[in-house]
Image (cartoon, rainbow, N blue to C red):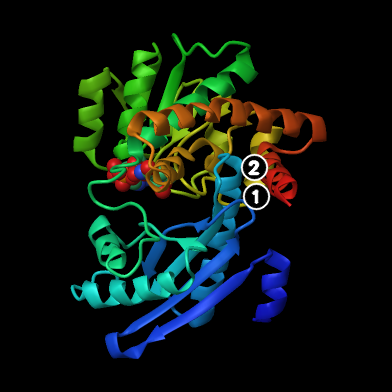
Amino acid sequence: MKLFDTLAEMGHEEVVMCSDPSVGYKGILAVHSTKLGPALGGTRFWQYATDEEAITDALRLSRGMTYKNAVAGLHLGGGKSIIMGDNKTKDREKIFRAHGRFVESLGGRYITAEDVGTSTKDMDYVNMETSHVAGLAGKSGDPSPVTAHGVFRAVQASAKRKWGSDSLEGKTVAIQGCGSVGTHLAKELHEAGAKLIISDIDSAKAARVKQLTGAAIVEGDAIFTADADIFSPCALGGILNETTIPKLKVEIVAGGANNQLLLERDGDELEKRGILYAPDYVANAGGVINVYGEVAGWDAQRALNKADDIYDTVLKVFDIAEAKHIPTYEAADRLAEQRLAEAK
Ligand code: NAD
Protein backbone atom coordinates (compact mmCIF):
# COMPACT_ATOMS: atom_id res chain seq x y z
CA MET A 1 0.00 0.00 0.00
CA LYS A 2 1.30 3.46 -0.89
CA LEU A 3 0.16 4.85 2.42
CA PHE A 4 0.75 8.56 1.99
CA ASP A 5 -0.74 8.53 -1.52
CA THR A 6 -3.81 6.77 -0.12
CA LEU A 7 -4.14 9.27 2.74
CA ALA A 8 -3.92 12.17 0.31
CA GLU A 9 -6.44 10.59 -2.04
CA MET A 10 -8.93 9.77 0.72
CA GLY A 11 -8.35 13.07 2.52
CA HIS A 12 -7.21 11.83 5.92
CA GLU A 13 -5.64 14.29 8.34
CA GLU A 14 -3.90 11.85 10.65
CA VAL A 15 -3.51 8.13 11.20
CA VAL A 16 -1.75 6.91 14.32
CA MET A 17 -0.38 3.40 14.71
CA CYS A 18 -0.43 2.55 18.40
CA SER A 19 1.42 -0.25 20.16
CA ASP A 20 1.78 -1.42 23.74
CA PRO A 21 3.23 -4.95 23.59
CA SER A 22 3.33 -5.13 27.41
CA VAL A 23 -0.48 -5.56 27.39
CA GLY A 24 -0.85 -7.12 23.93
CA TYR A 25 -2.39 -3.99 22.45
CA LYS A 26 -2.22 -3.04 18.75
CA GLY A 27 -4.38 -0.17 17.61
CA ILE A 28 -5.01 2.30 14.82
CA LEU A 29 -6.57 5.73 15.34
CA ALA A 30 -7.75 7.24 12.07
CA VAL A 31 -8.78 10.89 12.04
CA HIS A 32 -10.28 11.59 8.65
CA SER A 33 -11.53 15.14 9.16
CA THR A 34 -11.87 17.69 11.96
CA LYS A 35 -13.23 20.44 9.68
CA LEU A 36 -16.64 20.40 11.32
CA GLY A 37 -15.51 19.48 14.84
CA PRO A 38 -13.73 16.71 16.71
CA ALA A 39 -13.60 13.45 14.77
CA LEU A 40 -16.15 11.06 16.24
CA GLY A 41 -16.44 7.37 15.46
CA GLY A 42 -16.43 4.10 17.35
CA THR A 43 -13.75 1.59 18.25
CA ARG A 44 -13.91 -1.65 16.25
CA PHE A 45 -12.28 -4.68 17.94
CA TRP A 46 -11.57 -7.22 15.22
CA GLN A 47 -9.12 -9.90 14.17
CA TYR A 48 -7.77 -8.88 10.76
CA ALA A 49 -5.83 -11.25 8.52
CA THR A 50 -3.18 -8.62 7.82
CA ASP A 51 -2.09 -5.20 9.11
CA GLU A 52 -2.91 -3.76 5.71
CA GLU A 53 -6.49 -5.02 5.93
CA ALA A 54 -6.87 -3.32 9.32
CA ILE A 55 -5.47 -0.02 8.01
CA THR A 56 -7.74 -0.16 4.96
CA ASP A 57 -10.78 -0.72 7.20
CA ALA A 58 -9.78 2.15 9.52
CA LEU A 59 -9.37 4.49 6.54
CA ARG A 60 -12.67 3.48 4.94
CA LEU A 61 -14.71 3.57 8.15
CA SER A 62 -13.30 6.90 9.35
CA ARG A 63 -14.06 8.58 6.04
CA GLY A 64 -17.58 7.15 6.21
CA MET A 65 -18.02 8.81 9.61
CA THR A 66 -17.04 12.22 8.19
CA TYR A 67 -19.82 11.92 5.61
CA LYS A 68 -22.36 10.58 8.08
CA ASN A 69 -21.68 13.28 10.68
CA ALA A 70 -21.63 16.04 8.05
CA VAL A 71 -24.96 15.00 6.53
CA ALA A 72 -26.52 14.72 9.99
CA GLY A 73 -25.71 18.41 10.54
CA LEU A 74 -23.57 17.76 13.60
CA HIS A 75 -20.55 19.75 14.76
CA LEU A 76 -18.44 16.67 14.35
CA GLY A 77 -15.76 15.42 12.05
CA GLY A 78 -15.13 11.79 11.24
CA GLY A 79 -12.79 9.24 12.73
CA LYS A 80 -12.63 5.60 13.70
CA SER A 81 -10.31 3.39 15.64
CA ILE A 82 -9.38 -0.23 15.40
CA ILE A 83 -8.06 -2.59 18.04
CA MET A 84 -6.54 -5.64 16.39
CA GLY A 85 -7.16 -8.91 18.16
CA ASP A 86 -9.68 -11.40 19.47
CA ASN A 87 -12.73 -9.43 20.60
CA LYS A 88 -13.90 -12.33 22.78
CA THR A 89 -10.90 -11.93 25.10
CA LYS A 90 -11.73 -11.76 28.80
CA ASP A 91 -8.66 -9.66 29.47
CA ARG A 92 -10.23 -6.35 28.54
CA GLU A 93 -9.25 -3.73 31.11
CA LYS A 94 -5.61 -3.42 30.17
CA ILE A 95 -6.35 -3.41 26.43
CA PHE A 96 -9.03 -0.74 26.65
CA ARG A 97 -7.04 1.37 29.11
CA ALA A 98 -4.13 1.28 26.66
CA HIS A 99 -6.55 2.34 23.93
CA GLY A 100 -7.82 5.14 26.17
CA ARG A 101 -4.28 6.45 26.69
CA PHE A 102 -3.74 6.70 22.93
CA VAL A 103 -7.13 8.39 22.45
CA GLU A 104 -6.13 10.85 25.19
CA SER A 105 -2.85 11.56 23.40
CA LEU A 106 -4.85 13.14 20.54
CA GLY A 107 -6.09 15.79 22.99
CA GLY A 108 -9.75 15.67 21.96
CA ARG A 109 -9.26 15.69 18.18
CA TYR A 110 -10.79 12.21 18.24
CA ILE A 111 -13.75 11.01 20.35
CA THR A 112 -14.44 7.31 20.49
CA ALA A 113 -17.51 5.19 21.30
CA GLU A 114 -18.70 1.60 20.89
CA ASP A 115 -18.65 -0.30 17.64
CA VAL A 116 -18.44 -3.94 16.53
CA GLY A 117 -16.75 -6.05 19.21
CA THR A 118 -16.91 -3.45 21.99
CA SER A 119 -19.41 -2.69 24.75
CA THR A 120 -20.34 0.10 27.16
CA LYS A 121 -18.24 -1.69 29.78
CA ASP A 122 -15.18 -1.49 27.51
CA MET A 123 -15.84 2.24 27.10
CA ASP A 124 -15.81 2.58 30.89
CA TYR A 125 -12.22 1.28 30.82
CA VAL A 126 -11.36 3.77 28.05
CA ASN A 127 -12.93 6.47 30.22
CA MET A 128 -10.47 5.69 33.05
CA GLU A 129 -7.77 7.17 30.80
CA THR A 130 -9.60 9.81 28.77
CA SER A 131 -12.75 11.90 28.78
CA HIS A 132 -12.90 11.77 24.97
CA VAL A 133 -15.28 8.83 24.90
CA ALA A 134 -19.06 8.55 24.52
CA GLY A 135 -21.59 5.73 24.72
CA LEU A 136 -20.92 5.23 28.42
CA ALA A 137 -23.24 3.25 30.68
CA GLY A 138 -25.81 5.50 32.38
CA LYS A 139 -25.36 8.32 29.84
CA SER A 140 -27.14 8.54 26.47
CA GLY A 141 -28.01 4.84 26.60
CA ASP A 142 -29.38 2.59 23.85
CA PRO A 143 -29.33 4.61 20.60
CA SER A 144 -31.83 2.40 18.79
CA PRO A 145 -35.06 4.35 19.61
CA VAL A 146 -33.44 7.50 18.17
CA THR A 147 -32.10 5.57 15.17
CA ALA A 148 -35.54 4.07 14.54
CA HIS A 149 -37.21 7.48 14.79
CA GLY A 150 -34.79 8.87 12.20
CA VAL A 151 -35.54 5.94 9.90
CA PHE A 152 -39.26 6.57 10.37
CA ARG A 153 -38.73 10.20 9.30
CA ALA A 154 -36.73 8.99 6.27
CA VAL A 155 -39.63 6.71 5.32
CA GLN A 156 -42.06 9.64 5.63
CA ALA A 157 -39.84 11.90 3.51
CA SER A 158 -39.54 9.21 0.84
CA ALA A 159 -43.33 8.79 0.79
CA LYS A 160 -43.72 12.55 0.41
CA ARG A 161 -41.38 12.56 -2.61
CA LYS A 162 -42.84 9.45 -4.22
CA TRP A 163 -46.55 9.93 -3.59
CA GLY A 164 -46.93 13.62 -2.68
CA SER A 165 -47.98 12.93 0.90
CA ASP A 166 -46.03 11.69 3.89
CA SER A 167 -49.02 9.87 5.32
CA LEU A 168 -48.26 6.18 5.79
CA GLU A 169 -51.88 5.30 6.53
CA GLY A 170 -52.69 2.09 4.65
CA LYS A 171 -49.18 1.74 3.15
CA THR A 172 -47.46 -1.62 3.55
CA VAL A 173 -43.90 -1.69 4.86
CA ALA A 174 -41.74 -4.82 4.72
CA ILE A 175 -39.15 -4.77 7.52
CA GLN A 176 -36.17 -7.14 7.43
CA GLY A 177 -34.80 -7.58 10.96
CA CYS A 178 -36.76 -7.28 14.21
CA GLY A 179 -33.86 -6.35 16.48
CA SER A 180 -33.49 -3.11 18.41
CA VAL A 181 -34.01 -0.74 15.47
CA GLY A 182 -36.57 -2.90 13.61
CA THR A 183 -38.78 -3.26 16.68
CA HIS A 184 -38.89 0.46 17.52
CA LEU A 185 -39.47 1.28 13.85
CA ALA A 186 -42.31 -1.24 13.58
CA LYS A 187 -44.04 0.39 16.55
CA GLU A 188 -43.82 3.89 15.03
CA LEU A 189 -45.02 2.70 11.63
CA HIS A 190 -47.90 0.80 13.23
CA GLU A 191 -48.94 3.92 15.15
CA ALA A 192 -48.84 5.86 11.87
CA GLY A 193 -51.37 3.44 10.35
CA ALA A 194 -49.00 1.39 8.18
CA LYS A 195 -49.47 -2.35 7.59
CA LEU A 196 -46.39 -4.43 8.31
CA ILE A 197 -44.73 -7.50 6.87
CA ILE A 198 -41.70 -8.63 8.88
CA SER A 199 -38.93 -11.21 8.88
CA ASP A 200 -36.20 -12.26 11.28
CA ILE A 201 -33.97 -15.33 11.41
CA ASP A 202 -34.79 -15.35 15.13
CA SER A 203 -38.45 -16.40 15.19
CA ALA A 204 -38.94 -15.20 18.80
CA LYS A 205 -38.02 -11.66 17.79
CA ALA A 206 -40.44 -11.68 14.86
CA ALA A 207 -43.17 -13.11 17.10
CA ARG A 208 -42.70 -10.27 19.56
CA VAL A 209 -43.11 -7.62 16.87
CA LYS A 210 -46.18 -9.45 15.56
CA GLN A 211 -47.66 -9.32 19.05
CA LEU A 212 -46.91 -5.59 19.37
CA THR A 213 -48.12 -4.51 15.93
CA GLY A 214 -50.18 -7.27 14.32
CA ALA A 215 -47.55 -7.62 11.58
CA ALA A 216 -47.55 -10.56 9.18
CA ILE A 217 -44.44 -12.73 9.42
CA VAL A 218 -42.66 -14.13 6.36
CA GLU A 219 -39.65 -16.43 6.30
CA GLY A 220 -36.20 -15.77 4.85
CA ASP A 221 -35.98 -14.32 1.37
CA ALA A 222 -39.76 -13.92 1.09
CA ILE A 223 -39.26 -10.45 2.56
CA PHE A 224 -37.75 -9.34 -0.77
CA THR A 225 -40.78 -10.44 -2.80
CA ALA A 226 -43.34 -9.19 -0.27
CA ASP A 227 -46.31 -7.29 -1.68
CA ALA A 228 -45.36 -4.02 -0.05
CA ASP A 229 -44.95 -0.32 -0.91
CA ILE A 230 -41.78 0.18 1.10
CA PHE A 231 -38.86 -2.10 1.99
CA SER A 232 -37.00 -1.27 5.19
CA PRO A 233 -33.73 -3.18 5.72
CA CYS A 234 -32.99 -3.29 9.45
CA ALA A 235 -30.72 -6.35 9.67
CA LEU A 236 -27.42 -6.70 7.87
CA GLY A 237 -25.52 -4.82 5.20
CA GLY A 238 -25.07 -5.80 1.55
CA ILE A 239 -28.66 -6.96 1.13
CA LEU A 240 -29.36 -4.72 -1.87
CA ASN A 241 -27.60 -6.63 -4.63
CA GLU A 242 -28.04 -8.18 -8.06
CA THR A 243 -29.96 -11.13 -6.59
CA THR A 244 -32.37 -9.24 -4.36
CA ILE A 245 -33.10 -6.03 -6.30
CA PRO A 246 -34.90 -7.77 -9.22
CA LYS A 247 -37.23 -9.40 -6.67
CA LEU A 248 -38.39 -6.15 -5.06
CA LYS A 249 -41.96 -5.04 -5.75
CA VAL A 250 -41.72 -1.88 -3.64
CA GLU A 251 -41.41 1.75 -4.74
CA ILE A 252 -39.24 2.89 -1.82
CA VAL A 253 -36.27 1.47 0.11
CA ALA A 254 -35.57 3.21 3.44
CA GLY A 255 -34.12 1.42 6.45
CA GLY A 256 -31.70 1.43 9.32
CA ALA A 257 -29.07 -1.14 8.32
CA ASN A 258 -25.54 0.07 7.56
CA ASN A 259 -24.02 -0.40 4.08
CA GLN A 260 -27.22 -1.69 2.45
CA LEU A 261 -25.85 -1.51 -1.10
CA LEU A 262 -23.47 -4.38 -1.79
CA LEU A 263 -21.90 -2.36 -4.62
CA GLU A 264 -22.41 1.18 -5.83
CA ARG A 265 -23.87 -0.16 -9.06
CA ASP A 266 -26.70 -1.66 -6.99
CA GLY A 267 -27.71 1.92 -6.18
CA ASP A 268 -27.75 2.65 -9.90
CA GLU A 269 -29.91 -0.42 -10.45
CA LEU A 270 -32.49 0.75 -7.89
CA GLU A 271 -32.59 4.07 -9.72
CA LYS A 272 -33.11 2.32 -13.08
CA ARG A 273 -35.99 0.33 -11.64
CA GLY A 274 -37.63 3.54 -10.37
CA ILE A 275 -37.20 2.55 -6.72
CA LEU A 276 -36.55 5.58 -4.53
CA TYR A 277 -33.64 4.86 -2.18
CA ALA A 278 -33.14 6.87 1.02
CA PRO A 279 -29.36 6.47 1.51
CA ASP A 280 -28.59 4.34 4.56
CA TYR A 281 -26.21 6.67 6.34
CA VAL A 282 -28.66 9.56 6.03
CA ALA A 283 -31.62 7.49 7.25
CA ASN A 284 -29.81 5.84 10.19
CA ALA A 285 -27.97 8.92 11.51
CA GLY A 286 -30.11 8.86 14.68
CA GLY A 287 -27.48 6.60 16.26
CA VAL A 288 -24.70 9.11 15.91
CA ILE A 289 -27.07 11.96 16.81
CA ASN A 290 -27.69 10.13 20.08
CA VAL A 291 -23.95 9.87 20.78
CA TYR A 292 -23.46 13.51 19.87
CA GLY A 293 -26.24 14.37 22.33
CA GLU A 294 -24.19 12.72 25.05
CA VAL A 295 -21.08 14.74 24.13
CA ALA A 296 -23.11 17.97 23.92
CA GLY A 297 -25.06 17.28 27.14
CA TRP A 298 -28.51 16.96 25.51
CA ASP A 299 -31.44 15.17 27.09
CA ALA A 300 -33.14 12.26 25.29
CA GLN A 301 -35.94 14.44 23.89
CA ARG A 302 -33.48 16.82 22.24
CA ALA A 303 -31.78 13.93 20.46
CA LEU A 304 -35.18 12.70 19.22
CA ASN A 305 -36.01 16.22 17.99
CA LYS A 306 -32.72 16.40 16.12
CA ALA A 307 -33.48 13.03 14.49
CA ASP A 308 -36.70 14.66 13.22
CA ASP A 309 -34.50 16.76 10.90
CA ILE A 310 -33.65 13.59 8.95
CA TYR A 311 -36.95 14.22 7.11
CA ASP A 312 -35.64 17.50 5.63
CA THR A 313 -32.18 16.07 5.00
CA VAL A 314 -33.58 13.16 2.99
CA LEU A 315 -35.67 15.58 0.91
CA LYS A 316 -32.55 17.69 0.31
CA VAL A 317 -30.71 14.58 -0.91
CA PHE A 318 -33.57 13.81 -3.31
CA ASP A 319 -33.47 17.43 -4.59
CA ILE A 320 -29.74 17.19 -5.31
CA ALA A 321 -30.21 13.84 -7.05
CA GLU A 322 -32.92 15.31 -9.26
CA ALA A 323 -31.07 18.53 -10.05
CA LYS A 324 -27.78 16.82 -10.87
CA HIS A 325 -29.28 13.69 -12.48
CA ILE A 326 -27.36 11.40 -10.14
CA PRO A 327 -28.49 8.47 -7.98
CA THR A 328 -29.51 9.30 -4.42
CA TYR A 329 -26.54 7.50 -2.80
CA GLU A 330 -24.24 9.82 -4.72
CA ALA A 331 -26.37 12.85 -3.87
CA ALA A 332 -25.91 12.12 -0.16
CA ASP A 333 -22.13 12.32 -0.63
CA ARG A 334 -22.53 15.62 -2.51
CA LEU A 335 -24.55 17.06 0.40
CA ALA A 336 -21.84 16.03 2.88
CA GLU A 337 -19.11 17.50 0.66
CA GLN A 338 -21.09 20.74 0.34
CA ARG A 339 -21.23 21.09 4.11
CA LEU A 340 -17.52 20.33 4.44
CA ALA A 341 -16.65 22.86 1.74
CA GLU A 342 -18.73 25.54 3.47
CA ALA A 343 -16.85 24.83 6.72
CA LYS A 344 -13.58 25.75 5.03
P1 NAD B 1 -29.85 -6.06 16.25
O1 NAD B 1 -28.75 -7.05 16.31
O2 NAD B 1 -30.58 -5.70 17.49
O3 NAD B 1 -30.95 -6.54 15.18
C1 NAD B 1 -30.65 -7.14 13.97
C2 NAD B 1 -31.72 -8.21 13.73
O4 NAD B 1 -31.58 -8.70 12.41
C3 NAD B 1 -31.60 -9.41 14.69
O5 NAD B 1 -32.84 -9.62 15.32
C4 NAD B 1 -31.20 -10.55 13.76
O6 NAD B 1 -31.73 -11.81 14.18
C5 NAD B 1 -31.84 -10.09 12.45
N1 NAD B 1 -31.26 -10.69 11.25
C6 NAD B 1 -29.98 -10.98 10.97
N2 NAD B 1 -29.89 -11.52 9.73
C7 NAD B 1 -31.14 -11.53 9.22
C8 NAD B 1 -31.69 -11.95 7.99
N3 NAD B 1 -30.94 -12.45 7.02
N4 NAD B 1 -33.02 -11.83 7.80
C9 NAD B 1 -33.81 -11.32 8.77
N5 NAD B 1 -33.33 -10.90 9.97
C10 NAD B 1 -32.01 -11.00 10.19
O7 NAD B 1 -29.22 -4.76 15.54
P2 NAD B 1 -29.82 -3.29 15.52
O8 NAD B 1 -29.15 -2.48 16.56
O9 NAD B 1 -31.31 -3.34 15.42
O10 NAD B 1 -29.22 -2.77 14.13
C11 NAD B 1 -29.78 -3.18 12.89
C12 NAD B 1 -29.00 -2.55 11.75
O11 NAD B 1 -29.00 -1.14 11.88
C13 NAD B 1 -27.52 -2.94 11.70
O12 NAD B 1 -27.12 -2.98 10.35
C14 NAD B 1 -26.82 -1.80 12.41
O13 NAD B 1 -25.48 -1.66 11.98
C15 NAD B 1 -27.67 -0.64 11.93
N6 NAD B 1 -27.62 0.53 12.82
C16 NAD B 1 -28.05 0.43 14.09
C17 NAD B 1 -28.03 1.53 14.92
C18 NAD B 1 -28.54 1.46 16.33
O14 NAD B 1 -28.80 2.51 16.92
N7 NAD B 1 -28.71 0.28 16.91
C19 NAD B 1 -27.58 2.77 14.43
C20 NAD B 1 -27.17 2.86 13.09
C21 NAD B 1 -27.20 1.72 12.29
Figure check: 42 above or below 257 = below
Residue at 57% x, 22% y is 157
**Could you say which quadrant of the image residue 249 lies in?**
top right
Figure check: 12 above or below 325 = below
Residue 9 percent coordinates (x, y): 73, 68
Q: Which numbered circle lies on residue 81? A: none
Horizontal relation, residue 120 to residue 75: left or right: left
Indicate the amino acid at tag 2.
Gly
Horizontal relation, residue 155 to residue 63: left or right: left
Ligand 1 within 8 Å, label 1 CB: no
Q: Residues within 10 Å of mark 1 (few under 14, many from 20)?
A: some
Q: Can residue 292 be spotted in the picture?
A: yes
Q: Dot 2 corresponds to which residue?
A: 267
Indicate the amino acid at tag 1.
Glu
Residue 60 percent coordinates (x, y): 57, 63
**Could you say which quadrant of the image residue 314 lies in?**
top right
Figure check: 17 above or below 161 = below
| Closer to us: 2 or 41 | 41
Q: Dot 1 corresponds to which residue?
A: 264
| Closer to us: 171 or 337 | 337
Residue 77 percent coordinates (x, y): 57, 54
Q: Are marks 1 and 2 in contact (CB under 8 Å)?
A: yes
